[in-house]
């Protein structure tokens, strides 16, 4: 159906606005210090290769001191979590994940702001989460989500730098439903 015939049928349509930058970069600017980089893969009939660790890139300017893998089951939310001393550096490996960030930092000009990033097997990436920023991962797909994290401070079980809030408590005012736009 043409735009003219849609208008004649009484339907209102609007063209998308032009954009000069990627939506991820616009989203990341909502909270100071957040960085995202999509990681393009190289694919062929045997599989894929994803070059994600390159110490020449600004994303890896702080030392890698620790690394671990965490998973998120389909239909589940892992979070809210926050660290006061460390930044998290996620590499989303697999699954369909929405990672939501909330700036609760005292004195931050972005206090109260949210960022949402969507990752799929076709669109993986690196996400830098600064200290003091709350974060949670929601698996909206039907396969296990996997994330490798390379925090900037080594974990100390005697003095854990980990704070938690139940994602359903509404202490952080976020609606976990996935809207259709």
Image (cartoon, grey):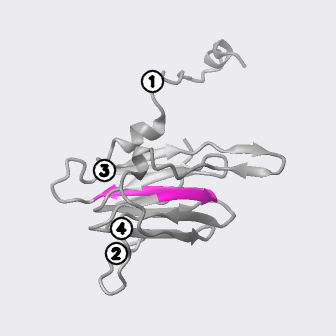
Residue 14: x and y in percent read 53, 22
How far apart marks 1 and 2 lie (CA) works out to: 38 Å
Mark before the other along the chain sequence, 3 or 2: 3
64, 125: nearer the viewer: 64
Residue 20 shows which numbered tag? 1
User: SS at mark 3?
Assistant: loop
Mark before the other along the chain sequence, 1 or 3: 1
Tag in front: 2 or 4? 2
- Left or right: 3 as drawn, with respect to 150: right
Circles 1 and 2 in contact, beta carbons < 8 Å? no
Residue 159: x and y in percent read 29, 83
Is residue 142 in sight in this rendering? yes
163, 140: nearer the viewer: 163
| 104 vs 35: above or below | below
Give the residue drawn at x 45%, y 45%. Answer: 56
User: SS at mark 4?
Assistant: loop
Which region of the structure is painted magenta?
90-103
168, 62: nearer the viewer: 62
User: SS at mark 1?
Assistant: loop
Q: Which residue is mark 4?
A: 170
Residue 162 shows which numbered tag? 2
User: SS at mark 2?
Assistant: loop
Residue 22: x and y in percent read 48, 33
Tag in front: 1 or 3? 1
Mark before the other along the chain sequence, 4 or 3: 3
Q: Which residue is mark 3?
A: 113
Mark before the other along the chain sequence, 2 or 4: 2
């Amino acid at each position: 159906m043409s735009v003219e015939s849609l208008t004649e049928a009484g339907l209102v349509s609007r063209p998308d606005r032009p954009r000069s930058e990627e939506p991820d970069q616009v989203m990341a600017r909502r909270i100071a210090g957040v960085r995202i980089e999509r990681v393009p893969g190289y694919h062929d009939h045997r599989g894929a290769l994803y070059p994600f660790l390159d110490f020449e890139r600004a994303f890896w300017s702080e030392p890698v001191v620790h690394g671990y893998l965490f998973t998120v089951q389909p239909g589940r939310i892992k979070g809210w979590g926050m660290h006061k001393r460390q930044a998290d550096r996620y590499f989303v490996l697999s699954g369909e994940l929405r990672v939501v960030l909330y700036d609760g930092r005292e004195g931050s000009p972005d206090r109260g702001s949210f960022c949402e990033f969507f990752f799929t097997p076709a669109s993986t990436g690196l996400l830098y989460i600064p200290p003091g920023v709350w974060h949670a991962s929601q698996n909206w797909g039907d396969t296990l989500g996997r994330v490798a994290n390379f925090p900037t401070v080594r974990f100390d079980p005697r003095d854990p730098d980990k704070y938690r809030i139940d994602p359903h408590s509404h202490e952080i005012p976020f609606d976990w439903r996935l809207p259709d736009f």
